Structures are given as structure tokens and as C-alpha cells.
Amino acid sequence: MTDTIPSRLFQQAKKAPSKAAYYVREGTGWTPTTWLEYAREVRRAGKALVALGVEPGQTVGILGFNRPEWIVADVAAMCVGAAPAGIYTTCSAEEVQYILGHAQSPVVFVENEHQWQKIQAERERLPELKYVVTMRGAPEIDDPQVLSWEAFLEKSDKSEEQTFDDRLGALQPDGLATLIYTSGTTGPPKGVMLSHANLAWTAATAVHMVSANGSDSSLSYLPLSHIAEQMFSIHAPITAGYAIYFAESIERVPENLKEVQPTIFFGVPRIWEKFHAGIQANIAQATGFKKLVVQFATSTGREVAQQVQAGQPISGLLALKYKLANKLVYSKLKPAVGLGNARVCVSGAAPIAKGILEFFASLDIYVLEVYGQSEDSGPTTFNQPSRVLLGSVGPRVPGVEVELAEDGEILVKGPNVFLGYYRDEEATQAALTDGWLHSGDLGSFDKNGFLHITGRKKDIIITAGGKNIAPKNLENDLKTHPLVHEAVVVGDRRKFLSVLVTLDPEAAGAWAERHARSTDALHEDGDVLAEVQKAIDELNTKVARVEQLKKFTILPRPLTIEHGELTPTLKVKRNKVAEHFSNEIENMYAE
């Protein structure tokens, strides 16, 4: 049988049938499901899909928050030769229709009535769609096209076991395994086609890089429609045999994290930024002896981090200081935020500021930045526990070729590179040349082989003076300030650079409370303006004159997915920001 993610699931069921594969929180505790039960669920769902008429080569949509039915539907679809296509829960009815219509899915799984209503609103524009399956616990929907989860599984009785086994055995390495619809910072989303070989090779490589094994665990909470979360919640756990815990909701993640204390934790930069703000606020309240202890621990942490990055052992006096700092601070702080057992912490999907990584390292928490895209199954480069450089996105993933074009564009070739874009030959040809993926990102390698991202080709700002400037590092630097949530640098074809800033809701609320101010007018408050100006002045001392930010505006509201200014993975859509805040931009450049 071909080595695929589905075949690995059934191997795990044989190897460790009674070991927990995943946990769901019920009542006051976490209820496990074993590998054998997981495999049986997948088999039953796969047989049900066959009974509904799903054929190899077709697609199956999945729309919902992280939960067992999501991953069961995903793996079951792969088992029978179909390709699952995850959809972000934040997508509008029109966006859901676009993806399901483009994928031509005959079946879609939806979490609840709210997601069903999106399908219902656009049903007339979905001629290929035959069945909507609601996930466990959703209210009954009286519609001939809708099946409850239980009714769906009952359809499996109409399928032969042999048919399922034949479909599973017929899977080919270069066959389409899954569709990842990009969140699309420009234009409609494209369907990234990943093969069974792409997923199997990448998962095995990721497991090897972090030495993952059956005793590990992780918390599943980020969108499963994203390749990174699929790797952490589906492909790597199945490959290594470790358990995942499904978070109850995004809001409950902090509490769930403290309960679970996973060994592997993946977060997008915004998650780490929130941790950073919360921990920093607590540290700032320390006084007297407690303050001295924290200062000792963080200064020791910085020394240790320098040694770790240099590949040097921790010995002598530093080893004694580290042991003491761990006893007094690290061993108490880490469990308090849910990272007491964490041995692998990862940040990905968007750039993160070096200052935030250094802050965590000073507390003995190494957040390893990974760089990649859906088109190469997630990772291109990765800071590994044994080889890390904060501020870089790590060395090349073993087995992957990474080169730089003449203009600095990052090019990728290897077993993880995708098959192309679904039903879009023109976009495929633009992205792939002789097997090389053109990432659209700009970077540079240092002498030790660590990749540093310098910007994105489409984001490059060309000033009126003809200078090319990548805004990423400027924005990331500003976002390390507790009050700053988003920073969007503008200045294309202008005489100088300016920046649009949004305030962090939590930090701004706390600031307003301390200073007895209204949160409604903080974007115009003189003291807040002075704080942001101070951060900009400090940034301007570190960059070339042409990169200095001359003016700024604090926007009256945050950027949102609903307004179309952020993608579901919280990347900024610059064109939408420029369109929605054109008056604010023009005012900064008015003579």
C-alpha cells in the first residue's frame, strides 16, 4: 500500500489501538478517543461518502471550528480518493459559495446552523452540491439536502468494506490529496493542490526535525483550513502517534492551554503578541525583591539565549544562574500560561518581530519561527530546537532546495512543492518554473545558512525618489509596542513614508482605565499620540533616512476580517486598507 496519511492512520490503529488519539472537553474533564476508534470513525465516514456517490478525484468541503468531525471528514475523504477542501469559518456566504463552486464539491460538512445558513443563502449558485452534512450536536435541519452526522454515518451500511479498501489501496503518491484555498491578500482564493506524497513526506520530515513521538501532545485551535494547523492537528499526529486536544473555542484557548499543558504548541504571531503583552503587564507590576528576581531571571535568560544561538554549552557560573532562575521564575511562569510541558513552541503563517522572540527567550521559552506557504505544504525553512537564530526563519528544511533569484525572490524545490492550482493553469505556470516554486517573498541567507525574510515583492514601496523599501521590518518593530496592534506603512510614489496604526484593544482599554480616559477617543488622545510618536522616533534612529517614518495616523477602529482588511489568517490586505482609509492617508501627505 502507498505510504499516505490515511494508510498511516490505520497503521497507528494496529500499533497502538488503545492509546488516545484525540481528546474533547466534556463536563469537567477531557474525554479520549483511541487510535482504533479514530480509524473506525474514518472508515465509517469514508464508506458513507462512497454511499453518497463521491467519486475519486472529486472534492469534499469542510466548514467548521476544530473538532473531531472535521479531521474525520478530512481523512475519510482522502481515503476514498476525494480531496477535502477546508473553508475558513469567517468566510462570508459569497466566499463559501466561491470555494464550493470552484471546487465543484458534491458534499460539504458544516459545523452548525450558522454555517448552514451560508450554504442556504447561496444554494441556487451551487448546482454541483448534493448533500450538506451537519456535525455532531448541530440542531436538526428539515431539508431534504441536509443529513445529520448520525444519519450520514448510517449511510455507510450501504457501502461494501471491499470498496473502501480498494479505494484506499488505489491511492497514488502523486494523486491529489487535499485542496488548501489560500486566504488571498489579492484577488479570490486559489486552490493549492497537495499530493499524498507532499503531505506524507512533509509530515515525516516535520516529525523528525522536532523529534516528535507518541508521548507528545498539542492543542488544536487555529483554522484547520490552513496547512500549518493541518500539519499540527492531522498529519504530524497521525505520523508520530501523538494526541491532540480540541480547544472548546478561540475564547477558551487560554484556559484550555493551562489545563492541557501540551508539549508542542503552534501559534500565529498574534497569539504570541497577546502572550507577550499579558506577561509583560504582569512583570511591570513586580516591585521590590520580586522585581529584582525577575530582572535576574530575564538577564540570565538573555545570556543563555546567546549561548544557545551560538551553539555553545551552558556551563560554569551561567549554568548555576540558569538553574536558580529556572527554580525561581521559569518553572512557575511557564505552567501559569500553559507552556509548562512545552518543548517545541512554533510561530508561523506571518512575520513576527525579533523583539518578541527575544522576550520569550529571556524567559526560557524558545519560539521557533517557521517559514513557508501552502504551496510547499507549509515549511521551507525552520528554526529547530538544536539550531536556532532568533530573527531568522531558520535554515532550509532537510531535503528541500532553497535558492534566491537575482532580485532576491525565494525559490523552492523539493518533495513538498505542490502540484499546481486547481483549475487554474495560468496561475500554476506563473508560480512554477521547472519545478521551482516562486514564493513571491524576498530574502537573504546569512553565512550560517539562516534565511532572513526582507519583504514581499508585491509589498515593496517605491518612493518618489525611486528607493525600494520593504515595509515588513518597520511594521514589526512598531508592533512590539504594547499599544500598537497593527502598523501599515504607506508611501508608494510619495516623498516620504508614513504609517497607519491601530491600537491593541486590551492594552488600550487597560491604559484608558489607568488614566481615567474614554476608549472611544484614544486614537486622538494627546498622551497616546505621544506614546506612539516616541516608538516611531526610536525606530527612526535604527533605520536609514529614506526608511524613516515621517507621519502617522491612529485609526479609529481595528482592521477586521469583516471589513475585508485582514485575511482569515490575519494578514493585512494593503489594497483594502489603502482604499478604506484613503482620506487618512491623503491628510498625512497634504502640504
Image (cartoon, grey):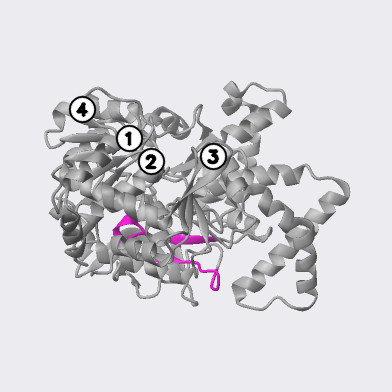
Q: Which numbered disc covers residue 122?
A: 4
Pair 4/3: label in front? 4
Query: In the shown orientation, is residue 278 left or right of residue 44?
Result: right
Q: Which numbered disc covers residue 482?
A: none
Residue 523 lies in quadrant = top right
Of residue 130 and residue 460, the one placed in the foreground of this image is: 130
Could you tell me residue 323's position as x and y percent? 77, 67
Of residue 470 and residue 236, the one placed in the foreground of this image is: 236
Residue displayed at 70% across by 26% down = 513
Segment tinted magenta in the rendering? 368-388
Residue 563 inside the magenta-drawn segment = no
Q: Using the rendered image of the protein, determine whether residue 467 is visible from the camera's viewpoint.
A: no
- Describe the element under mark 2 as helix, strand or loop: loop
Residue 369 inside the magenta-drawn segment = yes
- The answer to whether the residues at label 2 and label 1 have Cβ atoms under 8 Å apart is yes
- Describe the element under mark 1 as helix, strand or loop: loop
Residue linked to disc 3: 485
The earlier-in-sequence mark between 3 and 1 is 1
Residue linked to disc 2: 568
